[in-house]
Amino acid sequence: MSDQDDLLPGDDVNETPADIKMQKEDATQQAEGPASSEAGEEKKIADDMGMVLDIPVNMTIELGRTKMKIRQLLNLSQGAIVPLDGLVGEPLDILINGYLIAQGEVVVVADKFGIRITDIMTPSERMNRLSR
């Protein structure tokens, strides 16, 4: 009787130890049921979030804006004052990668400027501002 006579239906004589290990892992996961699968999904999501949390972004605090002609721009000199459209006491826009996400007010922290967030935009508020 040959070795192939001892095989059961579905057995593969060309299986490697790695194939057998994978089959055992699959069987274990199936036996553990959905709870194990959900835990695996949660770990994957946590790993993906870890990668996202390390992505650098640019934060810009916008004090105000103005429009001027190139002639006016070229006439600017040291000491010139450029009026902006922002009003004193008006909240400043906080942009992340150019997108408005919040507003805040200027504060001084240890002889440096900072910003206190006073309002965070909801996604619908952000869409409304984009359509203006």
Image (tube, helix red, strand yellow):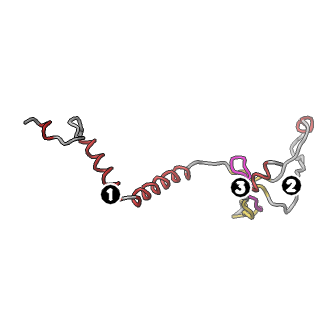
Q: Is label 3 in a helix, a strand or a loop? A: helix
Q: Which residues are magenta?
A: 94-105
Camera-side residue of 97 and 115 = 97
The picture places residue 27, in percent across and down from the top left corner, at 31, 52
- 7 relative to 56 in the view: left or right: left
- Circle on res. 123: 3
**Marks 2/3: CA–CA distance:** 24 Å
Q: Secondary structure at mark 2?
A: loop
What secondary structure is the stretch in magenta mostly built from? Answer: strand
Mark 1, residue position: 31
Residue at which label 2 appears: 86
- 73 in relation to 126, above or below: above
Name the residue at the left extreme: 1
Distance of mark 1 from mark 3, alpha carbons? 42 Å
**Amino acid residing under circle 3:** Pro
Eye-nearest disc, 1 or 3: 1
